[in-house]
Image (cartoon, rainbow, N blue to C red):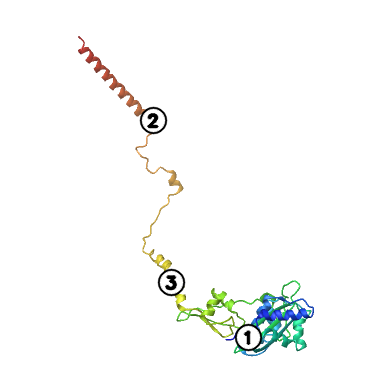
Amino acid sequence: MARLAGSPYDLIDAVNALRASYGLAPYSLNSILMYTAQSQADFMAATGSMTHSGPGGIGLTDRLLAAGYPLSGDLSLGGFRAENITGGRESMSAQAAVNGWTGDAPHLNTMISPNLTEIGAGVAVSGGRVYYVIDCARPTTSGAPQAAATSVEGGSPVPAAEAVIVPAAVVSTPNEAGDVIHEVSPGQTLWQIAIAYNVKVDEIKSLNNLSDNSIYPGNKLLIMKGSAVATAAETLAPTQAATQTLTGVPTVTVTIPTAASLLTPIDPSPTVLTSNTIIMKVAIGSIALALLAGGVFAWLGGSRKEGRP
């Protein structure tokens, strides 16, 4: 696969260089516009068509609102926004795309409009062709989305509170072989899918032999091989086995004494001596010693008398 001649950042640099030539301030890069532009480029690459309508026929204004962009202006008239698209052979450069857009007033105005301040760009390649998109817009002064909008593009009102793109929320479960396979939905990106499954983008690219981050609605991506799922499950086995070894242990009932029982003597020991008992025993011992001493003295006295000359 030939190397892509231009990137989204090459496209933005070329647009801002054009603005500088007209004495205009450069557009600021906006992450939401980067998302919407890339999604449209991916959609065109997947369908092989050049169109400003997204999946389901959704127009630019509705796409920006659905992505959560705080679009300013009269939303019933579309708001302050514009989009340029083009495509050609894969070798077509970003500068060539910008040069082509300068050939007519509407496309030129998208790039040098004094009413727009932010930009996002997208590039996708499919079947040897490259698709370029720039989305330019002006945000609200507060930076918050307007409450609601009815687009002139035939879309339904889009409540701002619901205008949040949710990454791949529905994840697939392993199939019979244990493999986890995800089918790409419109608007999903590789990094959103990686976050949803808690894996790395490079891991998904490696498993599916992807040379870049380009994915398209309907693509079926291998997220995890069956062996990897089994390995993850086996890490739980020791815990489960340890739990089962406890099922045969007899139940032991422990009786905890109440406060009242703790205050009641359970079995007074006969070896415990009171103070009176101790005094009595000491007195008896003293008397016994006195009698013994008296007997000894009497015996000694008698012995001396018998031995006197």
Marks 1/2: CA distance?
105 Å
Tag nearer the camera, 1 or 2: 1
User: Badge 2 local density, few (<14 within 10 Å), some, or many (20+)?
Assistant: few
Q: Position of residue 135 (x, y in %)?
A: 70, 81
Which label's residue is closer to the chain start, 3 or 1? 1
The type of residue carrying mark 2 is Asn
3 or 2: mark nearer the eye: 3
Front in this rendered view, residue 173 or 132: 132
**As drawn, is 164 to the left or to the right of 26?**
left
Name which of mark 1 and mark 2 comes first in the sequence: 1
Q: Secondary structure at mark 2?
A: helix
Are there few (<14), some (14-19), or many (20+) residues within 10 Å of tag 3?
A: few
Residue marked by disc 3 = 234
Which residue carries the number 2 mark? 276
- The residue pinned by badge 1 equals 43
x and y, in percent, of residue 296 in the image: 26, 20
Q: CA distance from mark 3 to mark 1?
A: 40 Å
**Residue 79 appears at what percent x and percent y?**
75, 80
- The residue nearer to you, when weighing 262 against 74, is 74
Three-letter amino acid code at disc 3?
Glu
Q: Earlier in the sequence, mark 3 or mark 2?
A: 3
Q: Amino acid at mark 1?
A: Phe
Give residue 55's position: percent from left, percent from top: 64, 86
Q: Which mark is residue 25?
A: none
Kindly give the residue lying farthest to the top in the view shown: 309
Q: Which image quadrant for residue 50? A: bottom right
